[in-house]
Image: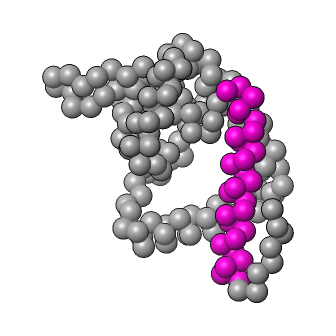
Amino acid sequence: MYDLEISDPTLNTWALLRQTWSLMDKGAETRLAKIRLTPEKLGVLWICRDFHGIVTTAEISRFLSRQSQSITGLLNRMEQEGLVRRTPKRKGRPYTEVKLTPRGQEACDAGTSVVKTLIEDTASVFSAKDRDQLHKLLRALRDHMADRLHIELTPPPDVPPDRPIDVKW
């Protein structure tokens, strides 16, 4: 990977964001691969474990910012691996519910421990003030892009808009 310094400041920002995300994702992939998980699989397991509502493909898609069809393929693989179980649609329930299996629970617990260590290490480069400033800048960028793409950002169901989501490590 090149250490880029580009003369156009906006392109330089774009390149830094892409490189940073790529490195962070690679770090998560590398560590999670040791326990036979991917960041995407862990995301699904975490949602199944901690989301208080009914977990559906659509809910997982919204949490992970992915298309439903890519989540369906991921769930197919995870079901074959015994990590999740899907309960088909039935009368009165127009959706398929996704649930964690005992094996999925074990994998989720191991994966969240791995990711917590990675996140704490990554965040250690920032002071609290720097972290808050970065949050402010990233929210502004995210909100701008959501507006441009006509994507409405809403809190998940049953989560008050003025409260952060509690995390269970």
Give the image quarter of residue 5: bottom right
Provide residue 15's location: percent of width, then percent of height: 70, 71
- On screen, residue 57 versus residue 77, left or right, reads left
As displayed, is residue 114 above or below residue 147? above
Please name the residue shown 64% across and 61% down the image: 135
Provide residue 34's location: percent of width, then percent of height: 75, 29
Provide residue 139's location: percent of width, then percent of height: 56, 64
- On screen, residue 154 versus residue 11, left or right, reads left
Q: From this viewpoint, is residue 169 visible?
A: no
Please name the residue shown 77% across and 50% down the image: 123
Provide residue 77's location: percent of width, then percent of height: 49, 28
Count of picture labels: 0
Type of secondary structure dominating the magenta stretch: helix
Please name the residue shown 75% across and 45% down the image: 27
Q: Nearer the viewer, residue 157 or 103?
A: 103
- On screen, residue 127 versus residue 75, left or right, reads right
Is residue 55 on the magenta stretch? Answer: no
Q: Residue furthest bottom?
A: 7
Q: Residue furthest top?
A: 102
Magenta-colored span: 9-36
Q: Quadrant of the N terminus?
A: bottom right
Please name the residue shown 15% across and 22% down the image: 91
Q: From this viewpoint, is residue 54 visible?
A: yes
As displayed, is residue 79 above or below residue 148? above
Q: Nearer the viewer, residue 17 or 168?
A: 17
